[in-house]
C-alpha cells in the first residue's frame, strides 16, 4: 500500500507532517517518513486543520525534514491535501 501524507499530533502537543501507511492511522505510536515539525503556525492557518488543508504559509515556522521518525502518543491523524503537502515542503520560517 502506498504511503500518504498526514498531519499528526501528539499528546505532548507536537504537530508533524509525515508519510505513513493508511492502515497505521489508528495506532498510538506511528513510524512516519519525510517528517517535518510545525514549530509555530500563524493565525491565517486557523488552527491545525488549516495546516492539513492549506499547508504552512509564510508566517509559519516549519522544520527541515528528517528521513524517518517514531511519533509516540499520537492524538490525531489527519489526511492532508496535495496543496498542503506542497506548502509544508517549502519549509517556511519567518
Image (spheres, grey):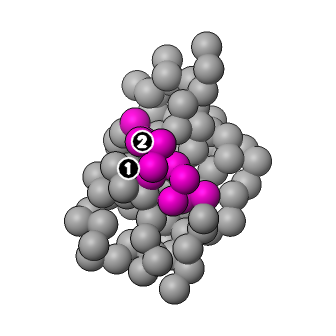
Looking at this rendering, what residue extends furthest in the bottom direction? 94
Q: Is residue 92 magenta?
A: no
Task: Check contact, mark 2 vs mark 1: CB within 8 A.
Answer: yes
Residue at (55% x, 69% y) in the render: 62
Residue at (59% x, 37% y) in the render: 19
Q: Is residue 80 magenta?
A: yes
Q: Is residue 60 left or right of residue 64?
A: left
Q: Return the residue nearer the eye: 93 or 9.
A: 93
Q: Is residue 30 visible?
A: no
Q: Is residue 9 above or below residue 1?
A: below
Question: Based on the displayed image, in which of its 4 quarters is residue 93 positioned?
Answer: bottom right
- The tag earlier along the polypeptide, 2 or 1, is 1
Kindly report the secondary structure that dominates the magenta region of the rendered protein.
Answer: helix
Image quarter hosting the N terminus: top right
Q: Is residue 53 left or right of residue 34?
A: left
Q: Return the residue nearer the eye: 54 or 77.
A: 54
> Residue 73: where, in percent of width, then height?
45, 43
Q: Is residue 21 above or below residue 46?
A: above
Q: Which residue is mark 2?
A: 80
Q: Which mark is residue 52?
A: 1
Spatial separation of the CA atoms under disc 2 and disc 1: 5 Å
> Residue 54: where, in percent of width, then height?
36, 55
Callout 2: helix, strand or loop? loop
Q: Mark 1 packing: few (<14 Cα in 10 Å), some, or many (20+)?
A: many
Residue at (51% x, 75% y) in the render: 61
Q: Is residue 78 above or below residue 41?
A: above
> Residue 76: where, in percent of width, then height?
35, 41
Residue at (61% x, 58% y) in the render: 89
The residues colored magenta run: 79-89
Callout 1: helix, strand or loop? helix
Q: Return the residue nearer the eye: 56 or 14.
A: 56
Amino acid at each position: 500500500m502506498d504511503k500518504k501524507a498526514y498531519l499528526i499530533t501528539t499528546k505532548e502537543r507536537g504537530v508533524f507532517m509525515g508519510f505513513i501507511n493508511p492502515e497505521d492511522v489508528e495506532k498510538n505510536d506511528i513510524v512516519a517518513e519525510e517528517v517535518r515539525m510545525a514549530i509555530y503556525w500563524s493565525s491565517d492557518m486557523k488552527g491545525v486543520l488549516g495546516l492539513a488543508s492549506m499547508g504552512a504559509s509564510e508566517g509559519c515556522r516549519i522544520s527541515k525534514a528528517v528521513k524517518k521518525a517514531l511519533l509516540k502518543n499520537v492524538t490525531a491523524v489527519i489526511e492532508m491535501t496535495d496543496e498542503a503537502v506542497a506548502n509544508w515542503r517549502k519549509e517556511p520560517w519567518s
